[in-house]
């Protein structure tokens, strides 16, 4: 169609840019995966351990915590370490949970380096609404691999994150390397 015909149909001005469609992110944008209360029955981090590893994107299960691929990753291989207990705050953890969450985050970094040559990491927990927690009711620590130059123009100008691999493929790669 000619540009004028497109404009008449309300499509807008052609801008010459390519589009990367990521419809899976609409669930995140709409808040569909976020529990509306602090109830453990609505919590995805309580549901995930009841699922098959592949379906739940679980990379590793420990005694008090597990490692899961982020369904809405900031970067390829973005993992989260979650205690099994439904607790909202780091100060609610037991000594055993603190030790295992730390050990699993350390192991996650080792695995990500081995399979993807990650050059750096962002580690963190967002606590409470003011702290930026998307799911405030269940503690989780992010382990985000980084590479020099990965924060290029796409997320800054294009407001787009490029993911070079499917989540299921990334989960399998990481789970295999975990052992």
Image (spheres, helix red, strand yellow):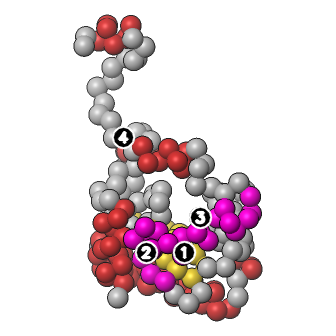
User: Which of labels 2 and 4 is toward the front?
Assistant: 2
Tag 2 residue: 53
User: Which residue is disc 3 drawn over?
Assistant: 44
Residue 102 in view here: yes
Q: Residue at x 30, y 59 (%)?
A: 165
Q: In x, y percent, where is residue 13? A: 37, 17
Q: Is residue 124 visible?
A: no
Viewer-closest of 157 and 99: 99
Q: Nearer the viewer, mark 1 or mark 3?
A: 1
**CA separation in Å, label 2 and label 4:** 27 Å
User: Badge 1: how crowded within 10 Å, few (<14), some, or many (20+)?
Assistant: few
Q: What separation in Å lies between label 3 and label 2 (alpha carbons)?
A: 14 Å
Work out whether mark 3 precedes mark 2 in sequence or the reverse, and give the earlier one: 3
Q: Which mark is residue 50?
A: 1
The residues colored magenta run 37-61
Q: Residues within 10 Å of mark 3 (few under 14, many from 20)?
A: some
């Amino acid at each position: 169609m000619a540009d004028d015909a497109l404009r008449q149909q309300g499509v807008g001005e052609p801008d010459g840019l390519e589009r990367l469609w990521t419809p899976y992110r609409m669930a995140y944008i709409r808040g569909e995966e976020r529990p509306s209360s602090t109830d453990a029955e609505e919590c995805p981090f309580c549901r995930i351990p009841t699922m098959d590893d592949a379906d739940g994107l679980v990379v590793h299960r420990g005694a008090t915590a597990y490692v899961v691929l982020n369904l809405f990753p900031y970067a390829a291989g973005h993992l989260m370490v979650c205690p099994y207990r439904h607790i909202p705050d780091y100060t609610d953890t037991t000594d055993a949970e603190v030790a295992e969450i730390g050990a699993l985050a350390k192991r996650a970094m080792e695995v990500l380096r081995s399979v993807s040559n990650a050059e750096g990491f962002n580690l963190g927990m967002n606590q409470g609404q003011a702290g930026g927690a998307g799911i405030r009711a269940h503690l989780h620590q992010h382990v985000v691999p980084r590479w020099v130059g990965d924060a290029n123009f796409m997320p800054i100008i294009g407001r787009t994150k490029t993911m070079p691999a499917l989540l299921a493929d990334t989960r399998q790669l990481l789970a295999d390397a975990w052992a």
